[in-house]
Image (cartoon, grey):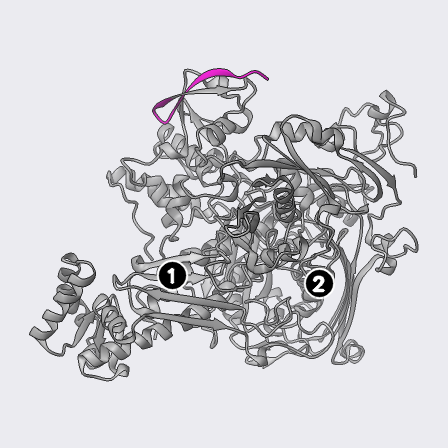
């Protein structure tokens, strides 16, 4: 298939890419931009490891055409760090065991970032519901809930570092 | 002494930031210049002879660099020395749908995929075997010619006198339990990148470098050497981040070797990453297991005898099978005191993907049967299910009837804590209609006492190097796969050396840099690699202590290493903490004005002249003193399990023994919808005896993860087969539980402090899984009074059991379904079906009606 020039805005920067019109967004990110933080865990939008935000909405980049995102703002896990430091949710995921093997983590963080922006103080059920599109095989999700709550507390306090697990 | 500065603290994994920022690299994230993409052609038939392969059309396609087939690397291999029955690419026969036939290396994935379609393979289809009991009757068309009756291996063990035991029993239960086949489904699909270095002397391809998603770099190096006929020294295996293993990456998966074969043929680096569907076909998960179990107890609840006949549907190759079937029998022991055991285990070959090791290797399905039956016996003799377990405790330390040495034994406390936290005594049987509590226990090895490669080499070796800057580098072959191996290593090194965690850097799992370690499986890393780390650190510490003692005018024994300080013990004394705090103040100043190398050394010498012998030194000062004194500062430690822990002498007695066992007790609370048969798990209380919790957050994470994975196997996860075709090769269809289906798990850490574990630590990542399934089964019994004999406990199965209890007619959901008009059911496609390459379909199948001559097969 003949390639076409496509302009993608990713993490605040504009890139001009020559892509086949059938190129998936995930492939454009991973292969053409070397943004390998977004993972391919399945091929059929069932695992959520490839979640990125398109205009702030979590989308599964493995089943989305790159060309369909022209003119939209794409945020990947690489765009989550704040001023070179971990965002509260990233720190909390590390501190509370929200990430074990870490393969699903970027997808979860993109989902959680959206959840907390839309709903800064979600209930347990709302957290569970929001995470249900992402699969994890290591954690059993429990420690993710703790991490999310810690991140909320850290954000509310306005500190960059989430409190360490105390016991 | 429980006063530690680094271990026992809930700290973030040292590699967490790489995972939460996306900066960490997994194998599929890597690329090297000139890298090609490999794709594998899989067999569409469950059992067939390959009569002809013609790759010429594929090779001519623009962008295809090489097509590799079986004869490019005809040597056999297998993870077990007794099971070398696999070819990386099939030579003459394919043995399951998905078996590997050819590999295309091309410039991109799309080209490689197109080339796969152009490979012509002529098959002679053979009769295939899908059911282990049927397979064992086979006389002809054997799956492997040297395995009569398709029997991979059978073992028959008798310990004590089971007949006498059953005669003494007051109550005997006997039943068949069936556990469905499950797979790891780690989030990261397997991936391997293979590249040959050009040799400067010969100018030809020389050393092979392989980056792979593996739990055991050393085994991969070994098998690559075997298949490629290259010395191990000419192969370097590097493990990048691994996105979960659960046993699925503990053996050499065909793509890991195929990538190297393709790279050799293409004379270019080749990366192969499985699609999710291929991961399911590659499998190596937990086999479907038929368990005929008989248990006898006395009126007081004590077990008199157990008889188990276990049959595992092992798939087409040996894989870890011999070990799996032995674990199933061996770990009947070491949990409870059972005086008489009879075990008959059969590992049977079938034309399905090979099963291998999966979290709780070999023990899980038998534990489901045993704990369910024990619950049934408790009900029959009118004893509380928690109490019957307490009446059968081991009197540790002891050696069980089948030769397993048990030292630390936290099971009594695990049982006590779970029933206390779950409110068992007050709530059991009082939760109302359709809701219940169930209890079950389990255990697991902290590493196998005997390695699968028979040798006397240490199971783990660790090197430590410290430089003048006080930075500590630990070289370990232990593989971080998400379980926290690197963090554990760093914690043990820091605690032993009395330095801060920030000083430790881990170099892990690179066969060029790190000593041999037999990898991350059978929950061996904390115990074995942890002990090796401890020993290496102790050796280095001795060197530092001798030099520091000289400077401080005392003996090495007088020194305490802690919090980046080396302090004289008499000062430490009773007001240890206070001294440390006051001593830490000047050291912080010295750290802040730290300078490098010679300047530091010069200023330190000046300082010493000024001050004379001191009562404390900073870690850096002590390190500099040690390097000045010894010339270098390195240490090595290794670990091999002691002879006493290596088990009985009977045939197969090498599997099961471990230097230490972890213990778990769990209570599950479930509700059952009697109208639909749907089971909901509300909460699981899981107590786990991990010896000592080196990092409580990690330990809890492992417990929760184990319980969760056990719950998946109990309720939803199952590989569904139809004539050798997998019906659900996708994460949605496989039904791995999402957050909304996952219960709250309350992890309870029990610390029994093992005498041989590093700081008393034992296993924490697998042992909890096995208890979850029977805990849920027993809770279902408590809720609605039906005993589940087949896992997973899907609504259909629960409903069938409920209707059977009421003597109602079973509902056959497929009654009256017209396969030509599947309004109610849509059979899962899968790309093999889609491409029309599947085995023969049903006569009335729409695809066959549309193209009556297309269907393959000549049975």
Q: Which residues are magenta?
A: A1-14
For residue A80, which quarter of the picture? Answer: top left
SS assignment for the magenta stretch, majority = strand
| Chain letter of the residue carrying label 1 | B
Relative to B858, residue B167 above or below = below
In the rendered image, residue B335, in percent from the top left (x then y), is placed at 61, 70
In the rendered image, residue B454, in percent from the top left (x then y), is placed at 64, 71
**Secondary structure under badge 1?**
helix
Which numbered disc covers residue B490? 1
Is residue A10 magenta-colored? Answer: yes
Relative to A7, residue B572 above or below = below
Disc 1: CA contacts within 10 A as few (<14), some (14-19) or many (>=20): many
Q: Residue at x 42, y 71 (%)?
A: B636
Q: Residue at x 87, y 60 (%)?
A: B148
Residue behind mark 2: B373
Front in this rendered view, residue B271 or B755: B271
First-in-chain label (2 vs 1)? 2
In the displayed structure image, the side of residue B627 where residue B739 appears, left or right = right
In the rendered image, residue B555, in percent from the top left (x then y), is placed at 24, 84
The answer to whether dots 2 and 1 both sit on one chain is: yes
**Secondary structure under badge 2?**
helix
Residue B825 visible in rendering:
no
Q: Residue at x 67, y 67 (%)?
A: B382
């Amino acid at each position: 298939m003949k390639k076409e020039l496509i302009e993608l805005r990713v993490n605040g920067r504009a890139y001009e890419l020559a892509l086949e019109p059938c190129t998936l967004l995930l492939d454009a990110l991973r292969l053409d931009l070397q943004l390998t933080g977004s993972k391919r865990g399945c091929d059929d939008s069932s695992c959520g490891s490839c979640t990125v935000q398109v205009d702030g909405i979590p989308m599964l980049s493995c089943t989305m055409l790159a060309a369909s995102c022209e003119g939209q703002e794409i945020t990947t896990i690489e765009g989550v760090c704040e001023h070179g430091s971990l965002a509260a949710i990233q720190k909390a995921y590390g501190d509370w065991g929200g990430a074990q093997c870490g393969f699903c983590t970027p997808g979860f963080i993109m989902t959680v970032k959206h959840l907390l922006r839309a709903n800064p103080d979600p209930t347990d059920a709302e957290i569970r519901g929001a995470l249900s599109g992402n699969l994890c095989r290591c954690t059993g999700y429990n420690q993710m809930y703790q991490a999310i709550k810690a991140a909320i507390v850290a954000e509310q306090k306005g500190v960059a570092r989430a409190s360490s697990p105390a016991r | 002494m429980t006063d530690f500065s680094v271990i026992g603290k809930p700290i973030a994994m040292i590699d967490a930031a790489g995972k939460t920022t996306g900066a960490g690299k997994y194998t599929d994230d890597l690329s090297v210049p000139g890298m090609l993409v490999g794709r594998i052609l899989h067999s569409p038939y469950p059992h067939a002879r390959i009569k002809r392969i013609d790759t010429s059309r594929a090779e001519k396609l623009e962008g295809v660099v090489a097509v590799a087939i079986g004869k490019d690397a005809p040597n056999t291999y297998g993870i077990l020395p007794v099971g070398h029955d696999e070819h990386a690419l099939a030579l003459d026969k394919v043995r399951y749908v998905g078996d590997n036939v050819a590999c295309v290396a091309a410039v991109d994935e799309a080209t490689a995929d197109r080339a796969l379609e152009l490979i012509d393979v002529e098959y002679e289809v053979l009769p295939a075997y899908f059911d282990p009991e049927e397979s064992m009757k086979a006389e002809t068309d054997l799956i492997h010619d040297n395995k009569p009756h398709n029997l991979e291996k059978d073992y028959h063990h008798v310990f004590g006198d089971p007949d006498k035991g059953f005669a003494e029993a007051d109550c005997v239960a006997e039943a068949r339990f069936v556990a469905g086949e499950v797979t790891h489904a780690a989030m990261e699909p397997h991936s391997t990148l293979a590249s040959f270095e050009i040799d400067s002397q010969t100018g030809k391809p020389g050393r092979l470098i392989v980056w792979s998603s593996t739990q055991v770099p050393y085994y991969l190096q070994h098998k690559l050497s075997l298949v490629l006929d290259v010395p191990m020294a000419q192969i370097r295996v590097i493990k990048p981040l691994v996105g979960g293993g659960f046993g699925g990456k503990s053996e050499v998966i065909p793509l890991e070797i195929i990538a190297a074969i393709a790279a050799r043929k293409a004379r270019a680096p080749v990366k192969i990453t499985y699609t999710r569907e291929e991961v399911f076909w590659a499998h190596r998960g937990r086999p479907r297991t038929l368990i005929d179990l008989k248990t006898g107890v006395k009126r007081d609840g004590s077990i008199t005898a157990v008889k188990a006949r276990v049959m595992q549907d092992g798939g087409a190759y040996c894989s870890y099978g011999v070990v799996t079937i032995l674990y199933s029998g061996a770990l009947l022991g070491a949990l409870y005191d059972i005086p008489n055991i009879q075990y008959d285990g059969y590992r049977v070959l079938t034309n399905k993907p090979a099963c291998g090791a999966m979290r709780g290797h070999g023990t899980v399905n038998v534990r489901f049967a045993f704990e369910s039956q024990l619950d049934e016996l408790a009900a029959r003799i009118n004893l509380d299910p928690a109490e019957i377990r307490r009446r059968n405790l081991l009197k540790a330390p002891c050696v069980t009837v089948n030769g397993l040495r048990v030292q630390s034994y936290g099971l009594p406390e695990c049982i006590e804590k779970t029933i206390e936290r779950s409110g068992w005594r007050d709530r059991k049987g009082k939760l109302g209609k359709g809701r219940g509590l169930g209890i079950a226990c389990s255990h697991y090895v902290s590493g196998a006492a005997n390695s699968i490669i028979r040798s006397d080499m240490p199971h783990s070796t660790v090197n430590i190097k410290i430089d003048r800057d006080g930075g500590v580098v630990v070289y370990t072959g232990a593989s971080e796969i998400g379980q926290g191996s690197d963090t554990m290593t760093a914690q043990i090194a820091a605690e032993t050396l009395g330095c801060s965690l920030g000083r430790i850097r881990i170099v892990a799992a690179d066969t060029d840099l790190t000593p041999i370690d037999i990898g991350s499986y059978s929950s061996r890393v904390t115990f074995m690699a942890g002990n090796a780390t401890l020993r290496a650190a102790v050796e280095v510490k001795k060197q530092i202590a001798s030099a520091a003692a000289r400077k401080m005018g005392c003996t090495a024994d007088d020194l305490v290493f802690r919090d980046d300080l080396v302090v004289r013990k008499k000062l430490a004394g009773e007001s240890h903490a206070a001294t440390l705090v006051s001593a830490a103040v000047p050291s912080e100043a010295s750290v802040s004005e730290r300078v490098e190398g010679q300047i530091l050394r010069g200023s330190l010498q000046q300082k010493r002249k000024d001050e004379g012998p001191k009562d404390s030194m900073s870690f850096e000062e002590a390190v500099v003193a040690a390097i000045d004194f010894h010339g270098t500062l390195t240490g090595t430690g290794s670990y091999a399990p002691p002879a006493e822990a290596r088990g009985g002498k009977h045939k197969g007695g090498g599997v099961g023994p471990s230097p230490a066992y972890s213990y778990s007790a769990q209570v599950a609370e479930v509700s059952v919808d009697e109208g639909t048969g749907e089971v909901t798990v509300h909460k699981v209380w899981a107590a786990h005896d991990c010896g000592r919790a080196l990092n409580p957050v990690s330990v809890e994470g492992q417990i929760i993860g184990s319980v969760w994975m056990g719950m998946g196997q109990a309720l939803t996860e199952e590989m569904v087969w139809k004539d050798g075709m997998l019906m659900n090769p996708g994460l949605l269809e496989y039904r791995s539980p999402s957050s909304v289906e996952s219960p709250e798990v309350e992890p309870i850490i029990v610390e029994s402090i093992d005498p041989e574990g590093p700081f008393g630590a034992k296993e924490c990542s697998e042992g909890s899984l096995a208890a979850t399934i029977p805990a849920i089964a027993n809770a279902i019994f408590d809720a609605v009074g039906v005993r589940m004999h087949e896992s997973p406990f899907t609504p259909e199965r629960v409903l069938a059991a409920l209707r059977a209890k009421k003597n109602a007619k079973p509902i056959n959901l497929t009654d009256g379904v017209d396969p030509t008009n599947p309004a109610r059911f849509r059979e899962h496609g899968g790309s093999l079906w889609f491409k029309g390459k599947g085995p023969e379909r049903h006569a009335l199948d729409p695809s066959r009606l549309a193209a009556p001559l297309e269907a393959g097969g000549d049975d």
